[in-house]
Amino acid sequence: MKIETLQLAALLHDIGKFQQRAGIARNHAELGYEFVKNYFSEDVASLIAGHHLDVPDIRENREQLLLLKIADHLSSGEREGREDEKGDPRVEGLLSVFCRIDIGKGELPEEKYYPLKPLTLEREVIFPRAEYRQASGYDRLWNAFESELGEHSKDVETLYHLLWKYTWCVPSAVWRDVPDIALFDHLRTTCAIATCLYMEHEKEPRNLEVLFYAVRRYWKLREDREVSAAAEEFRRVAGEDERAEFERKSFILIGGDVSGIQRFIYRMRSPQEAQKGMAKRLRGRSFYLSLLTESIAHYLLHRLSLPVTNLLWCGGGHFFILAPAVHAGLVGEVEREVNDFLLKEFQGELFIVLAAEPGSAFDLMEFPQYLKRCRDKIRSKKSVKGLSTIKSIESLNLTELCGGTAGSCDVCGRDAAELKGEEGEPERCEQCRGHERVGAKLPGMEYLVEVIAEREPEGCDVKFNFGGCWVGWRVCGGRNLSLDFGVESSCIRVYRVNSAELEIPHPGDVRRDVHLGFRFYGKTVPLEGFAGAREVMSFDALVKFSRGVERLGVLRMDVDDLGKVFSRGLEGEKDSKDNRTISRIATLSRMLDLFFTGYINRVAESFWAVREGANVCRDCEERLDEMKDRLVQVKLSGMRYYRAQHYDEDMLCRECEKDSTPLIYITYSGGDDVFVVAPWDMAVEFAWRLSREFSAYVADNPNLSISAGVFLCRERFPIGRAAQVSGELLDDGAKELPGKNAVNIFGETVPWRCRSYADMHADFERLFEFGRRLEGYLDEKKLSRGFVYSILSFWQETFSEVSRDRGYVPYAEAKRRRRYMPRFKYLLARNIDRKKNRELFEVLDKEVPMAVPWARVPVNWALLRTRRRGGEDE
């Protein structure tokens, strides 16, 4: 029986559970057999029919069934038994894995669940809620899956994405188990493990029956024991053959880490020479790096003949692949091939570290320890690899490496064989020009096409040559989708971007070697011009959309304590079962990536400007007319645009937003990392909105939080340096606050939101609201700018030294240092008539003492938002 048969059977072995929950009261193996027989083949269906048979009862396909049963057990080792109640598979929803993360930062939230809906980026679909525990709609979800399956080819990769779309929200097990693992993750990890076992067994046959019994024995021992106790007991009761098979190193966990990413994205030689095309170039660079990481991972899969299921996760310059140990020798060869390309292309600025950690069935069942060993090996190799790369560069003649040099690029500073530039423009290398071209195409990207070929493919926007094998990518809109690369290919993958819809404009182009799927990318950027002729907005134009002072806001954000979240977050209580397993960690990573590559676009799109005369619906037109006095007007290239002063709620419907332009420039977003450029006040509001959305996305669990650094600069400030500064504000400012979950803005570090207030307890939410009030008072001439500056002087005299020494103002110091109070009371009495302006007087009397220790947040917001351009305070 072919390996493809086993892979399909593993990927579909529990599909009967999905059908069963749609209302058919029959054994899920029987249902799976009938379904798979109709859509695939008898060979695949027969494996599914027998995957729950007892070993003595297996008569046919014995080896394949044992491989499937072992993989199923190794994958389902993630299931945690319920303590008392039993679940109802027909109605119970998928519990969010975020509800269970505990790193000691607060009590776990109430349990929240996902609705039974196909995967989309809409908030009502991917955000968990308590009311979804009793789910409904299995029948609709199943019918939609079956209908779409009938429209597509039945290859593993297309099936993988269909299962992702429809079973991401279906619990793998409910009745006796905590339902926090999606059926999709159980199916894909089963397929990955079965593939490795097949390849190993084919190379060196092993006693599969003994291995099966060993896995089952350890699984039962592990139900009520810690790792060390279970391992010790297993060695005591298991036979010698069982121990040998169970501990045989049949797998390798391959970890990949692309180093030099930050330096590569942000390095610019000269701020003036690099300004033109900066926005497109920066976006193109970050997109290039996303494709580089994915290309290396896909090249590894190609060289090792592994399906997409074996790529456990990929993003943020990192990936992990589960592979059979028989291919361990190829990993070093692939690493050399990739680094040869990177050295020639980037002169040592980027390099890849690949670590292959051997593992056994025991290691898969104790995946946290296995993953930690692989990560430790990566860290160890990175330092050695960095030194070897430096030595390699020193020994090379870079002029020869570049094929002769025409000089150094005015933008990136690297030596290049050819430099080009129009009159008045900087002389740029082909790479920088290529980044500009692909950056210009990204806003219109609806499809991303990947090709793997032995000869150089034609018409690629990005391409890599690893050891003579080409991995190419083409950015396409719906109207210009083409699958012709002019070469014979090993495979072609067509990804729908930011949508799980697998239809393509020209279905007739789909051949046997074309696989359909989808990908999520943070690709939102500001555009100017009319629909059909829009171009990426330059930073010079973007800055004009600021309210008040013209500044750009450069924002960096990432998840706090992510290492702890993965290493300790799923440990469980002391003496309980460790839940940090292969499927849970893969689920956790996949769901985090969905937020930062997919949903972030939805948040960014809600910060918009609408062109005068744009085609909007009547409701939106009336809403815009009502708030006309509160819209900011900007004239750009002869067109007038309007933007809202604040973005507290959606002001345009989803359809009308398509005719507006977002004002958030997502330069990079992936893994858990965000880099955004926007008008300065929008950058602040966007950071605040994203932090609140992230909290809701992770079920309001205080153990999961995100911090930010915001840097304000002029549009001509070197963007690479601005990114570095905002990163320093994040790492050395926000993340230095005890508990993190903070933002560093205007030189002040404060938490986003406190869960309880003491007398002087303030957070960004409260300070920001007070800053808005001050802004309103200044707009309405109820306060003078001098009064607001006085609040800042109170901070300067009382708290500047504390802030400089500690990096933030502790609450204990805020309560103790109140010597400014007499002066404030005098100032308030002199400037505000309590009888005539009672409400204003009481607000200031209450809020100013609260805000003084962190006054730079509300005061700078109010003063900068109300500054007249070219006039007062400029």
Image (cartoon, rainbow, N blue to C red):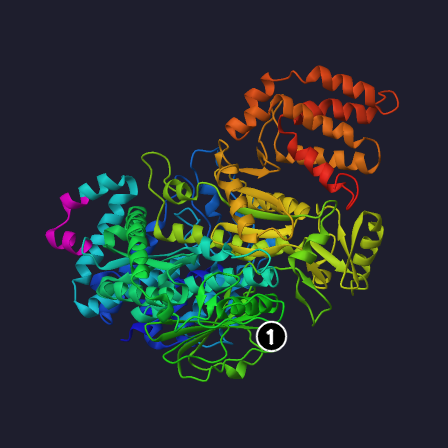
Q: Which residues are magenta?
A: 234-246
**Quick one: 839 or 240, which is closer to the camera?**
839
Label 1, on which residue?
478
Residue at screen point 75% across, 38% down = 873
CA neighbours of label 1 inside 10 A, class few (<14), some (14 to 19), many (20+)? some
Looking at the picture, does residue 534 appear above or below residue 559?
below
Looking at the picture, does residue 6 appear above or below residue 90?
below
Position of the C terminus by quadrant? top right
Q: Quadrant of residue 853?
A: top right
Q: Three-letter amino acid code at disc 1?
A: Gly
**Quick one: 658 or 845, which is closer to the camera?**
845
Q: Position of residue 359 (x, y in %)?
A: 24, 54
Position of the N terminus by quadrant? bottom left
Number of numbered markers = 1
**Quick one: 678 or 570, which is closer to the camera?**
678
Q: In the image as oriented, which residue stretches furthest toward the left?
A: 240
Residue at screen point 44% across, 72% down = 417
Query: Is residue 238 one of those drawn in magenta?
Result: yes
Residue 8 shows in the view: no
**Is 337 positioned to the left or the right of 849 in the image?**
left
Mark 1, secondary structure of its residue? loop
Q: Position of residue 463 (x, y in %)?
A: 44, 72
**Is 114 positioned to the left or the right of 614 in the image?**
left
Query: Is residue 230 one of those drawn in magenta?
Result: no
**Is 411 positioned to the left or the right of 716 in the image?**
left
Could you tell me what secondary structure mostly forms the magenta stretch?
helix
Q: In the image as oriented, which residue stretches furthest toward the right?
A: 836
Residue at screen point 42% across, 84% down = 487
Q: Position of residue 869 (x, y in %)?
A: 77, 46
Q: Position of residue 792 (x, y in %)?
A: 68, 28
Residue at screen point 46% across, 61% down = 289
